[in-house]
Structure formats: C-alpha cells, structure tokens
Amino acid sequence: MTTSKILIVDDEPDILELLQESFEDAGYYVITALNGLEALSLLEHEQPDIILSDNRMPGMSGIELMEEIRKNYPDSIRLLMTGYADLNIAIEAINRGWVYKFITKPFKMEEILIAIRRALEFYEIVRQKKMLEAQIIQQNQILEKRVIERTHELQHATEELESKNSVLLKQKEEIRRLYSQLQRSYLGTITSLYFALEAKDQYTRGHSERVFHYSLHMGKELDLNLEEMVYLKYAALLHDLGKIGIPDSILLKPGKLTPDEYATIQNHSSVGASILDPIQFLCQVKEIIRHHHEHYDGNGYPDGLTANNIRIQGRIIAVADAFDAMRSDRPYRKARTREKALQELQKYAGKQFCPECVEAFNRVISEVGDFYDDPTLEKQYAEELQFMQYEMPGMQEIFSFSKKRELPEPV
Ligand SMILES: [Fe+2]
C-alpha cells in the first residue's frame, strides 16, 4: 500500500509544524505551503492525495485556493479549516463542490486525522468506481466494435450465401428443365418409332389409337382421378410398345404361330415396360404396360396377377385391346361383329376381363360408338393424334377432343 501524500497550507508556521508532525506520525507523507500561491506552485510538480488548507490567509483565501485547485485538479481531495465566522462561506464552498469537508477551528488533532482517513477512504471508493466505469466503457467499446465487425461478417456471409443459393437455384431449374426436355425427347423418339412400327402392319394399323380413345372414355366412366388418367393416357397409347423388339417374321406372320413364336409375342408386354425404364416420370406407366395382358382370374402374363392387383389402367386397356383386336381383320381370321365382340367380352368378364371394366366399356360403346361402325370417328380422332408422332404433347392437347373435363400437364 502506498503512503498517502498530504499538502498542508497555513500561514501560521506553528500550526503548520504541529499538523505536519501529527500527520507524519500517522504515517502520511507531508508537504507544506505558507500561502495559496506557494501551494499552487507546489502543485505544478507535486500530486498530493489530500490538500488541507486554512481559510484565513493573507492574499489568496483558502476557499479561493480550493476553487483554483478544483479547476486544474478536479479529482483532488480538498479539506478546509475555518473558524465559526466563516462557516456559511465554507458550507457554500462544499455545495459548489470546491471542498469535500471543512474542519472548524479550533480543532482537535484526532478529529482531523479521522476526517483525513475518511476522506481518503471515500475518495478511494470514488477512484475505484471511476476506474470500474472506465473499464466498463472500454469493454463496451471493445464489444461494440466486435459486434459491428461480426455483423459485417455475417452480412457479407449472408450475401454470399444468397448469391450462391440463387446460382444453385438457377442451375437446379436449368437441370430440371433439361432433364424434363430429355425425358420428353426420349419419349417422343420412342413414340415415333412405335408409330412407324405400327404402320408396317396393315392389320393392326390404328389399333393403339383406337385403344387409346376407348380407354380414355372408359377411364372417365370409371371415374378415375386426374393422375390415374395421365398414366392411362400414356399406357394406352404405348401398350404394345414391346412389339418393336419382335422380328417381322413373327409379327407379320400370316399363318398360325408356333408355341415358341407365341411365347416371343407374349414377351412384348415385359419388353415394352423395360424400354420405358429410363423415363422416370413414366415408371407407373411402365407397370401398366407390363400388365396389360394379365387376366382377372390370374391366368394372364407375365406375372399372373389377379383382380385388383392389376392396376385399373391395365384392366381397362385389356378390354379395349381385346375388343379392337376382335373387330379387326387378321391374316388368320375375319373381324367379328360388334355384337359378337361384346358378347365375347361379357363371356370372359370375371375370367379374362375385369367385370366392372366390361360394363364401363358397354356404356362407352353405346354412347360414343365403334370405330368400325362409324368411319368419321377414326378420322376425327386421327387428326387430333397426328402431332403425337413427332413430339409428346401435353395432357390438355391430348384431351382436347373431350369437352367433358380439363386435365393438367403431367408431372
Ligand atoms: Fe398387347
């Protein structure tokens, strides 16, 4: 602990000496001045902790000295010794902040020492408080600076992220667009190939288109939802896609097929499904095509599925497909009449065909008619389907012939 330094100012040398001895005995370091000017001169190179001054002195009074000291050394501890006659002036000096405390004369040395000690304690508290406040201000400034720096960093990082995110979103959108374009282009190629193949066979020419239209009418009769209708559309049109892989010698054979040749023909449903493998958005269509020759009673191919285990679209296409096949001439047999073909469907309802689908088909034929009985029907639909040979159209274009219902684009 450092020794506190006290400056005593008094024009009476005896009192000055008495006070100096007492303070030094109490452990303080003491410097003295006989008047105000001398005290101010001392303060130019000394820094006392306490200044104790008499009030009544020739020249500069103690209060004037304290006022002067306060201007230049506001943190100094200032005590004034004064007689009763000057009490009012001394109290005003305290109120104005010029002095910390006054000591009335005559004084007792113990009182002065107590006053000095308390003043030192008080100012030590004040000093520490100021020091803490300064530290808090400094820390706050450091923190504030860090907050500003960090905020700038975060703003910069956020802007960078937003910028990267925007680029990524654009890239993602472009990839999605290109992927969709690729899928449609692939589907368009397959469709064109399929139509080219179908055109080779005069007996089955137009078969897929007719199955397509019968199936869509049946789908509406059976109240399929929009998504189911989308899959039905593609599957009906491409249901015999697998025939691309069958040699002409078998596909166009005029006579009866051997068991091996028949087995090759039967492969077309699974081959058709595998051709669609790369087109992700047609994965459900692929399943329908695979199962368009399943029988309601489980005796069909390739997986022997039964009843509702066969997708509704597969069951619909099976009925439309069989009807159109029976209604057309084949190298090995003549076409059946509409009534005969409908009777066959009825006969095999619940066996080969879904009974509900056969009922729906009967309603469609009654309402819409039969392509073979009404040649204008085929012409009307063929015009609407023409563009499909070059590109895959959207749903609304496909269904444009129908005034009953609007359908969305496929996803
Ligand atoms: Fe088929």
Image (spheres, rainbow, N blue to C red):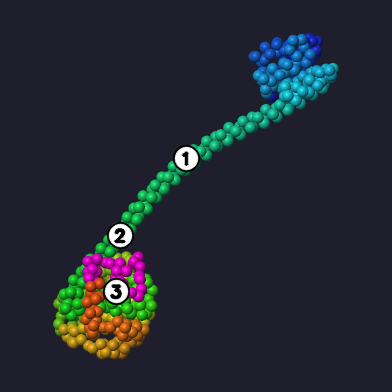
For mark 2, does the 10 Å Cα neighbourhood hold few (<14), some (14 to 19), or many (20 or more) residues?
A: few
Position of the C terminus, as image quadrant, is bottom left
Of residue 139 and residue 73, the one placed in the foreground of this image is: 73
* Viewer-nearest of discs 3 and 1: 3
Q: Secondary structure at mark 3?
A: helix
Name the residue: 27% across, 89% down.
339
Disc 3 from disc 2: Cα separation: 29 Å
* Disc 1 crowd, CA 10 A, few/some/many (<14, 14-19, 20+): few
- When asked about the image quadrant of residue 338, the answer is bottom left
Q: Where is residue 12 drawn, in percent x and y?
A: 79, 10
Give the quadrant of residue 140: top right
The residue labelled by disc 2 is: 179
149 relative to 103, above or below: below
Kind of residue at badge 1:
His
Q: Quadrant of residue 67?
A: top right
Element type at marker 2?
A: helix
Locate residue 368, reporting x and y percent.
30, 82
Quickly name the residue at label 1. 152
Magenta stretch encompasses residue 171? no
Eye-nearest disc, 3 or 2: 3
Task: Tell me where the magenta segment starts and ends, as one range.
Answer: 385-411
| Residue 231 % position (x, y) | 33, 72
Q: Amino acid at mark 2?
A: Tyr
* For the residues bearing labels 2 and 1, Cβ distance under 8 angstroms: no
Checking the image for residue 401, the label placed there is 3
Q: Is residue 339 left or right of residue 143?
A: left
> For the point 27% across and 66% down, which residue is it?
392
